[in-house]
Image (cartoon, rainbow, N blue to C red):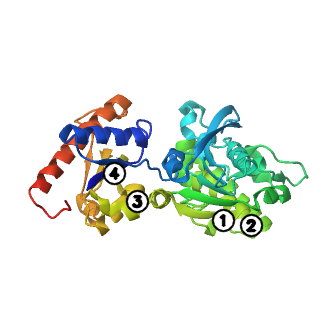
């Protein structure tokens, strides 16, 4: 038997790989001979390429694209030309962390660079493209991306609309080239949210505030999305508002539903399935997972919960580690997850805890404490697998 370590990233602090190594180091402080499997994971956001790299045998491809501010950046995605498969993260092209807080402008942020990545993957021979939808800085409904892919949009005066800030003025479109480019390509949306395209739980109301939107901006953006959804339905026959997760990545998901006949998949389930974790789960005596913030959202289909469900089937204890833990024990226990622990050593600022060196050390120490407790109980002949 061995230990499975599969932590999601601690955003702004540690990648999944770094978090896993910290836990491994903590376990080895207690037992240097313990067998440990490290699994890089992600749920559709930053790190999705890394999480699927081994399973899909991906190599990196770099491409110069426009970011959300229309500035040139070098974005990286994963590709396997032999399998005709690519994995793209929207955050690589229009990621929110790339934009300083003072420069965030939800009204103007464009998803154009995502379209450039998809188009390049198609040109490189990809016929299946996984699109990780987390971490975007945009709320343009996928308008910029569609333009990069060949869509042409016009206002009432037959003038082409090219700027995101004017996409609410679009009244008709020419999507012939766009559809031609996408017709032989399967687009798989990799995501961990199920928000609709517009409305109170849609892309603008739920996510635009963190992208720099004021309350007035949110209302404007929501109206834009509602208008664009109707345009897409006229053009394609697809009512994106009825598609699960269409509001993901500021509506990029909805645009891909409409024009690429995309299908949705849970990022957590995809990563675990392609890495064959369900088949291997019985090989482990302990599973350690977690993420930066463990709260009610963690129980809403995110990766630590998926790990917990797999462990429960084989009666394997699952422990979560996080920067903060804000969830009642009884709710956590109902999910069959054994326990959750914060890595904070005591009162300290979020800024201090998010320092990568501090976070690594505290994660290492907390993992050591948890593993030592597990070892003591296992040696005491408890009910856990041994």
Q: Quadrant of residue 347?
A: top left
> Which of labels 4 and 2 is toward the front?
4
The answer to whether the residue labelled 1 contacts the one labelled 2, judged by CB atoms less than 8 Å apart, is yes
Residue 137 visible in the displayed image: no
Distance between the alpha carbons at the discs numbered 3 and 4: 13 Å
Residue in the image at 69% along x and 57% along y: 127
Q: Which residue is mark 4?
A: 289
Work out how far the residue at label 4 is from the one at label 2, CA to CA, in angstroms.
41 Å
Q: CA distance from mark 1 to mark 4?
A: 34 Å
User: Are dots 3 and 4 in contact, CB under 8 Å?
Assistant: no
First in sequence, mark 3 or 4: give its number. Answer: 3
Residue carrying label 2: 233
- For residue 262, say whether it is visible: yes
3 or 2: tag closer to the N-terminus: 2
Quickly name the residue at label 1: 240
Where residue 373 appears, as percent x and y from the top left, is 15, 49
Comparing 202 with 121, the one in front is: 121
Q: Secondary structure at mark 2?
A: helix
> Which residue shows up at 77% across the image and 43% down it?
163
- Sequence-wise first label, 4 or 2: 2
Q: Of label 1 and label 4, which has the lower sequence position?
A: 1
- Report the disc number at residue 277: 3
* Dot 3: element: helix
Give the Cα distance between marks 3 and 1.
Answer: 33 Å
């Amino acid at each position: 038997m061995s230990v499975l370590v599969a932590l999601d990233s601690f955003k702004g602090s540690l990648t999944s790989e770094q978090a896993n190594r910290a836990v491994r180091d903590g376990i080895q402080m207690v037992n240097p001979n313990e067998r440990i499997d490290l699994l890089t994971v992600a749920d559709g956001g930053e790190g999705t390429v890394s999480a699927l790299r081994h399973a899909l045998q991906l190599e990196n491809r770099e491409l110069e694209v426009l970011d959300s501010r229309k500035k040139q950046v070098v974005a990286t995605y994963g590709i396997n030309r032999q399998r005709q498969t690519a994995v793209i993260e929207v955050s690589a092209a229009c990621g929110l962390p790339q934009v300083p807080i003072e420069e965030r402008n939800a009204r103007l942020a464009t998803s154009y660079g995502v379209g450039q990545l998809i188009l390049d993957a198609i040109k490189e021979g990809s016929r299946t493209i996984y699109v990780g939808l987390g971490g975007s800085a945009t709320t343009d409904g996928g308008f910029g991306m569609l333009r990069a892919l060949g869509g042409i949009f016009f206002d009432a005066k037959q003038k082409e609309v090219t700027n995101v800030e004017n996409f609410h003025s679009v009244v008709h479109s020419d999507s012939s080239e766009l559809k031609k480019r996408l017709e032989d390509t399967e687009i798989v949306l990799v995501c961990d949210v199920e928000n609709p395209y517009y409305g109170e739980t849609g892309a603008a109301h739920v996510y635009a505030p963190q992208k720099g939107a004021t309350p007035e901006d949110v209302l404007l953006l929501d109206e834009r999305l509602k208008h664009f959804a109707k345009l897409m339905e006229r053009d394609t026959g697809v009512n994106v508002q009825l598609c699960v997760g269409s509001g993901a990545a500021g509506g990029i998901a909805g645009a891909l539903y409409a024009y690429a006949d995309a299908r949705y998949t849970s990022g957590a389930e995809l990563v675990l399935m392609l890495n064959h974790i369900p088949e291997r789960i019985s090989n482990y005596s302990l599973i350690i997972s977690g993420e930066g913030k463990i709260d009610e959202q963690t129980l809403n289909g995110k990766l630590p919960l998926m790990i917990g469900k797999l462990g429960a089937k084989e009666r394997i204890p699952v422990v979560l580690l996080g920067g903060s833990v804000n969830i009642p024990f009884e709710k956590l226990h109902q999910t069959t997850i054994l326990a959750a622990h914060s890595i904070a050593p005591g009162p300290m600022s979020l800024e201090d805890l998010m320092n990568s060196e501090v976070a690594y050390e505290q994660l290492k120490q907390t993992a050591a404490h948890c593993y030592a407790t597990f070892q003591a109980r296992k040696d005491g002949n408890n009910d856990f697998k041994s």
